[in-house]
Image (cartoon, rainbow, N blue to C red):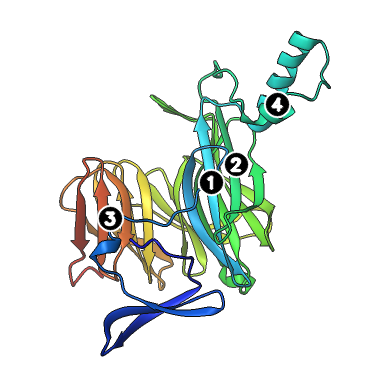
Amino acid sequence: PLAYDALEHAAPFASPRCAEGVVAVAGASLRIFVCDAATQGEFTQAVVPLRYTPRRLCALPPAGAAPRVLVVEADQHRYNEAERRALAAARRVARDGDMDTGDDDDDAADDAGPVPPAPGKWASCVRVVDAASGATLELLELGESEAALSCCCVRFAGRGNEAFVAVGTARALTFHPRTFTECAVHVYRLLDARLVLLHRTPVEAPPLALAAFRGRLLVAVGASARLYDLGKRKLLRKAETRVAPALVVRVAVVGDRAFCGDALHGVSLVRYARERNALVVVAEDAAPRGVTALAALDYDTVAVADKCGGVTVLRAPADAD
């Protein structure tokens, strides 16, 4: 950890007087510094206030030199922004008899209001953030009781170098028991800093993980992994396979492989067989584990975190293909 100014570019640096250093550009200055034991425990951080609880984030293509991040937010048992403002206006009418008093307008956005009595009530939004300044560039509120659960940035093979944003959602989701009314994958065009909805594709279960996969979109739907291509009115399903006994909650892609983490039974390794246009499970975790996060380290190795607080590094066998 390093408490220092924001750096635009950095690279390793070594010289007789500085064996292990860093050379970096910060504004109009060139800086050379060393990270030693005295800097441990110090962090440079910037707080970006959000409307709801952040659920997922992904990096977006930078606009010029400014990096951008997409954040999907969702809160259960919460009214969305429009409903909260309507409730605040109703309270003002009951109290003052005038909707246009104006003195409570600023408080309406910060007042969470009462807890919704109906189960499956969600408030959710999609936000584009300038990672350098922390400013919000775009904010889209989702529909009533619709929760954003996953997101990724994807470039489809048939659309050149254009970047799209995919967001997985579920409506009226409850966990005990697990129920929902509908689920979908929203695809947005990324125009400068604006998100423009292209279409939404219904799916049978909450899409808990999305990933770009060789010019297509890999979607975890229940216990299956699906490969989609971009269509004019919706996503077009190209391949599908059941990869987990319970529920796929995480996906990490490297090359033509995807590591799929199950909520109860560990990690499965899936390979895309181009000659058959099919997804094939080539290796499975030997020990059951409730996956909460995973990251591909290389073509054969994945790091996994589980519900018990453990971190495990798994490697695929040499004959996995």
Up-down relation of residue 237 to residue 185 (above or below):
below
Q: Which residue is mark 3?
A: 268
Q: Which residue is mark 2?
A: 125
Q: Residues within 10 Å of mark 3 (few under 14, many from 20)?
A: many
Q: Which residue is mark 1?
A: 72
Of mark 4 and mark 1, the one earlier in the sequence is 1
Q: Which x, y percent locates residue 298?
A: 29, 70
Name the quarter where the N terminus is drawn. bottom left
Q: Which x, y percent locates residue 268?
A: 27, 55
Quadrant position of residue 184: top right
Out of 321 and 55, give the one closest to the viewer: 55
Of mark 4 and mark 3, the one earlier in the sequence is 4
* Disc 4 to disc 3, C-alpha distance: 46 Å
Question: Does residue 244 appear anywhere in the picture?
Answer: no
* Disc 2 to disc 1, C-alpha distance: 6 Å
Q: Amino acid at mark 1?
A: Val
* Disc 4 to disc 2, C-alpha distance: 16 Å
Q: Which x, y percent locates residue 151?
A: 51, 52
Label 2 with label 1: CB-CB less than 8 Å: yes
Of mark 4 and mark 2, the one earlier in the sequence is 4
Q: Which residue is mark 4?
A: 85
